[in-house]
Amino acid sequence: MLLRAAAGNSAGLSIEGAILCHPWFGGNEPVEGEPVDRAAVSAKLWMYVCPGAVGGADDPRFNPLATGAPALEKLGCARMLVCAGKEDGLYARDRAYYDAVAASAWPGTVAWLESDGESHVFFLGKPECENAKRLMDRVVAFIAGA
C-alpha cells in the first residue's frame, strides 16, 4: 500500500509513518532461516486468496522483495516500524523485509522490534502479557514520534 500511495500521489499527500505489526509476507522460494515448508504453505494460501496473482506467491503485494517488485526506495512514508514474534514462522520474511528496507536507498527511517518467545500476532490472544505491553509501548512511542 505504501508503494501504491507513493505512485498515485498526485495530490501531494504524505504518510508520516507505517507500522507493520506481524506482517504476512511470502514467496515462491524460501528465504534464509524460514522453516522448510513455510514458503510452500504460504504460497498455496496466497493462491487461494488471490488466484489470479501474477507470479503466484511472488506477486509484489505478497512478496515485496520479489524480482520485478517496485523499488523499496519509493516507499510512500517517512518512517516505518516493523514488528515480529521471534517464534513466528513468518519471522524470517519479516526480518528480510526490514533488512531490505534498511539497506535500500529509501530516505526514511525504519525500526525493528522483535518479541522473544512469541508467535504470530500473540498480542491478540494474550494482550496483558509483558511482551504485548512492550509492543504496545513501542507502537505508542512510534506514533508519538519517538
Image: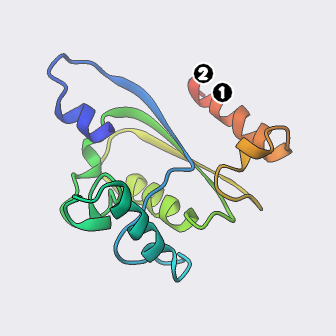
Mark pair 1, 2: CA separation: 6 Å
Establish if 111 lies above or below 100. above
Task: Return the x and y of residue 133 as percentages of the image width and height.
Answer: 79, 37
Question: Seen in the image, is 76 located left or right of residue 18?
Answer: left
Element under disc 1: helix
Left/right of residue 79 with respect to residue 104 in the rendered view: right
Q: Residue at x 39, y 59 (%)?
A: 100
Q: Residue at x 77, y 62 (%)?
A: 117
**Label 2: which secondary element:** loop
- Residue 80, image x, y percentages: 47, 39
Checking the image for residue 144, the label placed there is 2
The answer to whether 18 is drawn above or below residue 120 in the figure is above
Crowd class of label 2 (few under 14; some 14 to 19; many from 20; radius 10 Å): few
Direction right: furthest residue: 129
Label 1 close to label 2 by CB (< 8 Å): yes
Amino acid at circle 1: Val
Task: Tell me the kind of residue under disc 2.
Answer: Ala
Please identify the quadrant where the N terminus is shown. top left
| Mark linked to residue 97 | none
Q: Which residue is mark 1?
A: 140
Where, quadrant-wise, is the C terminus in this rendering?
Answer: top right
